Amino acid sequence: MSRPFLLGLLLLFLLVGGLATLNALWLTLAMPLAIYLLTGFTLAPEKLDLAIERELSPERALPGQPVTVTLRLTNHGASLPHLRLQDPLPTFASLTEGSATRLLNLPRGATCEWRYTFTGKRGFHRFAGLEAISGDPFGLVSLHQLLPTSGQVLILPNVPRVRRIAIRPRVTRVYAGSIPASQGGTGTDFFGVREYQPGQPLQAINWRVSARHPEALFANEYEQERVADIGLILDARLRPNDLGPGLPIFEHSIIAAASLSEAFLAAGNRVGLLIYGLYINWTNPGYGKRQHENILVALAHAIPAESQVFSGITIPRRLFPSKSQIVFISPLLPDDVEPLIALRAADCPIMVISPNPIRYEAASLPATAPYRQAARILTLQRHTTLQRLRHAGLQVIDWDVTRPFDQAVESLLSRPPAYIRAIGAGSKT
Amino acid sequence: MSRLLVHGFLTAGCLALAFGWATTSYWPASLALLILTPLGLYLVKRKFTPTLGIFLALAVISAALGISLHMPLPYALTGLLCLLAAWDLDEFTRRLAFAAPEDTPASLQKQHLQQLSLLLLSGLGASLLTTNLHLKFNFELAIGLVLLIFASLLALLNWLRNLER
């Protein structure tokens, strides 16, 4: 029940009661209520006529970096003695300086500039508008208005630096890069010896081999290094990422995706990103810093969500060039093994980066015997899942998220594992 | 300070009404009010929003019935005014939560208290004036006035209901 309605009802009760009982004292009691009500209605403004401008600095920030919001409000209507303002903040942001709400007196024609600062975690927020409420001094009449403003803030994910990631895709592109292409040519690593061709530099002649075969001159050949197509797949399904409130393992997947994309793009590769969750969010493959920016923006928007259509892993192969390197980032479910093995069987080299959800969740639980036992059972189940993937020829990295990504995986990623090296020879351009 | 005043006015209003009822022969009503006071304070402390509205309605009903049962007017009027003040300040406290430090909440509070006290004094003055002012109408005029009041009140309530929507 609203305040004026309650007051009106009580007033009616006293007046009717006074008339019914013919007791004038009832009407005496009604006087303060009537004066209160009438004063409220008299002092209430008729309408709000406010103009608002918003500035955000910066509009793109890193987690923890302060973002300053400046609001400039001008009153073109009547004086507003009790103007309440509220700027709804994004859920991922926390206020560090100033206030996102105000209660002020704004005379006719006056301008109020207002500033506050917040920091936030990864995310994207579009400021829809400022909520303004004005009314009489006693809060009986309230006029609400949503003052539309433009402005959006994008908090990009953290990008830990991983210096080198050794991958051996089956196919490389024609441009020079850092991925061994299993083809002789110019490069740094020794590849083989072949007959000297006129035009080759004399430094390339292998004099020892040439001395053993006096009929011809032989020259060293080096392994070509080229760029490759890399597809990052981020698992944003709710089921593998939902460990309960306060356990955002998805944020770790985001960090891994950001870090890997940065490393691959820095090496000159062509990288695309597929976010697999509520729907398929595809960032077209590209090169360089611009693509890194595109990927970070896509990652800033990503949220885990549930979809019946995408509850299982069904990767649309046509999005990725044939035999390109695929990096799948997911805490993994046992059901995901078969689709990944099927993808591997289609001659796609796959690297799986899996933030370990069991260790992550166990760290937040009490170290009692039942929890330890449960963690042990789940660890065994996970070990079996990962082993099945390894046996199928996938490179699997089990990331203990209690350690930073760069420290945890750098040594594992700097050279491919022995079984991948053993089977990974024979790239084609 | 507003929160403290809300508690103070709630207690004072309930006590005034309880004393008023104690002067009549219906003392259980006084006891009920005394029992309700700590409950009201607890609910206000727990920030249960409708508490003061309910207490204001109780105060109006209690004061009106008390008056019919020979409760002295000063007790009834004090109780009603105190609870009206508590009801108003409770809402103001919620509004004040929006104030930023640069809005100088202390001065806003002072300004509101001045306005409220002026309003309550006007209400008190008008009440006292009506008790001492006696006008005599003939029957037809009195009937006409009653009908006018009814029509006005119905229009007011209708308008308030529309406002609520």
Image (spheres, helix red, strand yellow):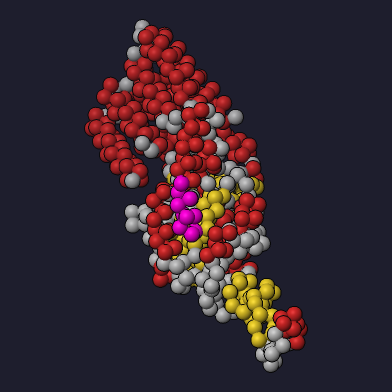
Q: In this image, B147 relative to A79: left or right?
A: left
Is A390 one of the magenta-colored residues?
Answer: yes
Q: Residue at x 51, y 28 (%)?
A: A369
Residue B159's place in the image compared with A308, above or below, is above
In the displayed structure, A325 sits above or below A386; it is below
Q: How many marks?
A: 0
What quarter of the picture does the N terminus of chain B occupy? top right
Which stretch is magenta?
A384-394
Residue A187 visible in the picture? yes
Image coordinates of residue A95 in percent, x first then y, are: 60, 47
Rendered location of residue A413, percent (x, y): 61, 58
Q: What residue lies at 50% left-to-right and 19% top-to-bottom?
A: B12
- Please identify the residue farthest to the top as the structure is shown: B25
The one of A286 and A22 positioned closer to us in this rendering: A286
- Residue at 38% of width from left, 23% of height from top? B58
Would you place residue A198 above or below residue B30 in this image? Answer: below
Q: Quadrant of residue A179?
A: bottom right
**Res A64 visible:** no
Residue A424 lies within the magenta run: no
Q: Which residue is at a point 62% across and 79% down the rendered structure image?
A: A184
Q: Could you tell me what secondary structure mostly forms the magenta stretch?
A: helix
- Along the line of sight, the residue nearer the viewer: A79 or B74: A79
Camera-nearest residue between A219 and A69: A219
